Amino acid sequence: MTNINVGRMSGVQYQSFSQTSKVSGLDWEKIPHKGMERPSEAEFTSKIDELAKGLAEARYSNDNSRYKSLSSEGEKMRAQYISSVSPDRKNMVDEASELMNQSRSNAGKEETDKPHDFMDYLNKKDGVGEYAKKGSRGSASKSGTTVVLTGSDLQPDTFEIKGSKAGQTVMGYASGNWYHVNTSEEQNMQQNFLSRLNKAEDRYYRQYINAGPLNTGQDFDTASATKNRVDYTA
């Protein structure tokens, strides 16, 4: 699983978007999902240009705090942009929560009061012996949402969420963190968004370096900006 990476270039921290992004909590402003409020294409063009200009300014002045703040806004804008092709993750998480609560309730009824020694602990961890019936994996479905349990009995709160039993994983929870996985359609939209943002930021950054006028949409030689370029798709 690839997480949101934090790197450094030109003295400025930035976040790179990958197909899988991990977050400690459910921030629905940054997790793309069906039904998000989405600006028009014309508004996106203006917002992307404004964000790119701000990022270039922060990058040129080595303003780490401002760059991180703008990058956070960029995450929200990216989620809005690709949400037009996103699954209903918000509803799927609600249904998964109901399934997990039911699973915990059932597991509680099956627990015995007998003491566990170290070998019993290992058997339970590996799902062998008397624990083989339960095993460490399973799945449950509700209204099309499928929850696949991927942890052990000792770490039950580890699971993946799919739109169907045979579908792609689009959300998951492990080690106290939520993560979402882009569908192929979302990944294509994300690449388009980041390409537009990177090009616009490079254009403005070159303007600050050369201290000369550069109109919106004007072509330029990217070689001069390669040294300090922030690549969001890394």
Image: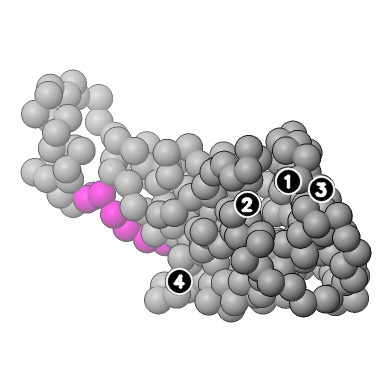
Looking at the image, is mark 4 or mark 1 earlier in the sequence? 1
Distance CA(mark 1)–CA(mark 2): 9 Å
For the question of whether residue 133 can be seen, the reply is yes
Q: Nearer the viewer, residue 91 or 190?
A: 190
Q: Which circle marks residue 168 in the picture?
A: 4
Q: Quadrant of the N terminus?
A: bottom left
Distance CA(mark 4)–CA(mark 1): 37 Å
Residues drawn in magenta: 134-140
Q: Which circle marks residue 57 in the picture?
A: 3
Give the class, few, some or many, for how many residues have Cα within 10 Å of label 2's Cα (few <14, many ≥20).
some
Residue 230, percent from left and from top: 62, 54
Q: Is residue 139 magenta?
A: yes
Where is mark 1, residue-wise?
59
SS at mark 1 in the image: helix
Residue drawn at the location 18% of the way across and 21% of the way down = 115
Q: Nearer the viewer, residue 44 or 111?
A: 44
Q: Nearer the viewer, residue 47 or 184?
A: 47
Residue 10, percent from left and from top: 63, 43
Q: Amino acid at mark 1?
A: Arg
User: Where is 56 relative to 116, above or below?
Assistant: below
Q: Amino acid at mark 4?
A: Gln
Residue 66, percent from left and from top: 78, 39
In the rendered structure, are the residues bearing label 4 and label 3 in contact, judged by CB atoms less than 8 Å apart?
Answer: no
Looking at the image, is mark 2 or mark 4 earlier in the sequence? 4
Distance CA(mark 4)–CA(mark 3): 39 Å
SS at mark 4 in the image: loop
Where is mark 2, residue-wise?
228
Give the class, few, some or many, for how many residues have Cα within 10 Å of label 1's Cα (few <14, many ≥20).
many
Nearer mark to the viewer, of 3 and 2:
2
Nearer mark to the viewer, of 2 and 4:
2
Q: Is residue 179 magenta?
A: no
SS at mark 3 in the image: helix
